[in-house]
């Protein structure tokens, strides 16, 4: 089930970023930062009353023909289009301005639920200032203070009340959902077309052709799949088209709905820093991952080229050491047939369960081979381990003191589990608990 989206909009200098930063930066049971995302200060994953949602910060909406104003207004319009609920923020000290009224006109056209937040109401004596904002036509104004964090709970209660009811698409449990993520122009759409055997999505050499996620179902060897194509993700800080500003969010939505994520690299241009940032989204989400090196036909190669490139991938993507690497060419269709087996294997491992008795035989053998080290004069005692979840496989190891489980020894246990049971293509999570 995809998360609802909230856009914070308003004219400049009403405190949008202050509110956004407060929700993102402070632990008031509202926000858990999404790694690698909030650095752009555009969007984050938020939580209120056990409901998670994505929140978008926007630039101020101003009227004018200057290129910067047009870009800022365009970005806000895209955010409004992406949103399920809009927080319209105004400045309570200034009263209603002409710019506020222009923003209101834009929001009327959206036909989206709007929560009116009157910022900079820093004390009870100022609450009378909110009544004039009823005339904007968005119902009850909510007085808040970005400086002091006042009124945010009431505002968020109203925001969550407007979230639409989400129903899961009726898909068979055996259906494998996978998405393709990567920077623009690595050939994701071409790969989709090649896998489907027909032109289902637009293919173009122009970066960013695919604007939104496109779901397509197909069957291969009596196995059902749903493939999700996503817009390419551009490097932060780069000047880019308005709609591409939010392509990362759309890709994150696709990752949420996926069982397996294909991280698509350009074999011709090689690996850049943005590739690692993109791959990190899938890893942090706990999804199964397959690394796909596309455009392999365009690479000048000999019998050692593939091994060298694979070593480079392993070096640059150390956090994805569990992910298989598939070399192919969507253009010539060479080696494309090797991709689905890797997707299937990653999906099966992502949901694999291990019997507790067999698991503990492996763990006890590992302990005998490499006893737990002492830390600060205390020795870690491992009693037993059990698998508590799948997607990704999650294990709890019961010990005498969780603080004594050093990350290096945790890594050793993970490697022994992988050696015994495979789990190629999926991350593994291990948590230490004190035995009662």
Image (cartoon, grey):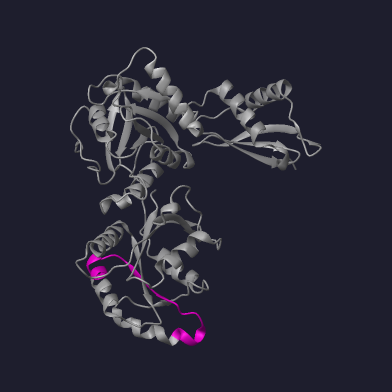
Which region of the structure is painted magenta?
Answer: 106-127
* Front in this rendered view, residue 356 or 198: 198
- Res 314 visible: yes
* Front in this rendered view, residue 260 or 297: 297
State whether residue 262 is above or below residue 59. Answer: above
Residue 269 at x, y = what percent? Answer: 32, 30
| Left or right of 57 on screen, residue 381 | right
State whether residue 248 is above or below residue 107. Answer: above
Quadrant placement of the C terminus = top right
State whether residue 110 is above or below residue 275. Answer: below
Residue 299 in which image quadrant = top left
Q: How many marks?
A: 0
Is 109 covered by the magenta stretch?
A: yes
| Left or right of 201 on screen, residue 409 | right
Residue 262 in which image quadrant = top left
Residue 242 at x, y = what percent? Answer: 26, 54
Is 39 covered by the magenta stretch?
A: no
| Left or right of 260 on screen, residue 401 | right
* Front in this rendered view, residue 179 or 148: 148
The residue sitting at the right extreme is 377
Residue 91 at x, y = what percent? Answer: 38, 77
State whether residue 380 is above or below residue 305. Answer: below
The residue sitting at the top extreme is 303
Residue 380 in which image quadrant = top right
- Res 349 visible: no
Q: Residue at x 37, y 48 (%)?
A: 236
Residue 255 at x, y = what percent? Answer: 39, 42
């Amino acid at each position: 089930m995809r998360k609802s989206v909230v856009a914070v909009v308003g004219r400049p200098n009403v405190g949008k970023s202050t509110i956004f930063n407060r929700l993102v930066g402070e632990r008031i049971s509202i926000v858990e930062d999404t790694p690698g995302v909030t650095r752009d200060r555009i969007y984050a994953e938020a939580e209120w009353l056990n409901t998670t949602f994505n929140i978008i910060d926007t630039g101020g909406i101003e009227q004018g023909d200057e290129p910067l104003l047009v870009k800022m207004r365009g970005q806000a319009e895209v955010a409004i289009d992406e949103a399920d609920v809009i927080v319209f923020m105004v400045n309570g000290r200034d009263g209603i301005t002409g710019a506020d009224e222009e923003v209101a006109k834009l929001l009327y056209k959206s036909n989206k639920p709007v929560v009116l937040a009157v910022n900079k109401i820093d004390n009870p004596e100022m609450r009378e200032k909110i009544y004039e904002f009823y005339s904007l036509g968005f119902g009850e104004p909510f007085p808040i203070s970005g400086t002091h964090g006042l009124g945010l709970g009431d505002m968020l209660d109203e925001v969550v009340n407007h979230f639409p009811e989400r129903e899961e698409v009726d898909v068979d449990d055996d259906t494998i959902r996978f998405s393709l993520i990567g920077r623009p122009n690595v050939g994701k759409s071409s790969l989709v077309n090649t896998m489907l055997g027909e032109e289902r999505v637009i293919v173009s050499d122009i970066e960013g052709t695919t604007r939104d996620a496109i779901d397509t179902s197909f069957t291969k060897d009596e196995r059902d799949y749903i493939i999700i194509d996503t817009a390419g993700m551009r490097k932060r800080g780069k000047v880019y088209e308005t709609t591409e500003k939010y392509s990362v969010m759309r890709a994150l939505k696709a990752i949420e709905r996926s069982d397996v994520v294909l991280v698509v690299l350009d074999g011709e241009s090689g690996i850049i820093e943005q590739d690692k940032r993109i791959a990190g989204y899938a890893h942090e989400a706990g999804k199964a991952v397959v690394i796909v090196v596309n455009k392999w036909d365009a690479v000048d190669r000999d019998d050692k080229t593939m091994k060298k490139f694979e070593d480079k991938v392993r070096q640059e993507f150390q956090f994805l050491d569990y992910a298989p690497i598939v070399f192919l060419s969507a253009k010539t269709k060479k080696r494309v047939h090797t991709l689905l087996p890797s997707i299937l294997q990653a999906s099966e491992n992502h949901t694999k369960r291990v019997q507790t008795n067999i698991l503990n035989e492996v763990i006890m053998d590992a302990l005998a081979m490499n006893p737990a080290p002492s830390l600060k004069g205390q020795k870690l005692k491992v009693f037993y381990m059990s698998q508590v979840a799948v997607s990704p496989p999650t294990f709890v190891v019961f010990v005498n003191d969780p603080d004594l489980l050093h990350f290096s020894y945790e890594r050793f246990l993970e490697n022994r589990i992988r050696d015994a049971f495979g789990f190629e293509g999926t991350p593994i999570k291990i948590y230490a608990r004190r035995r009662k």
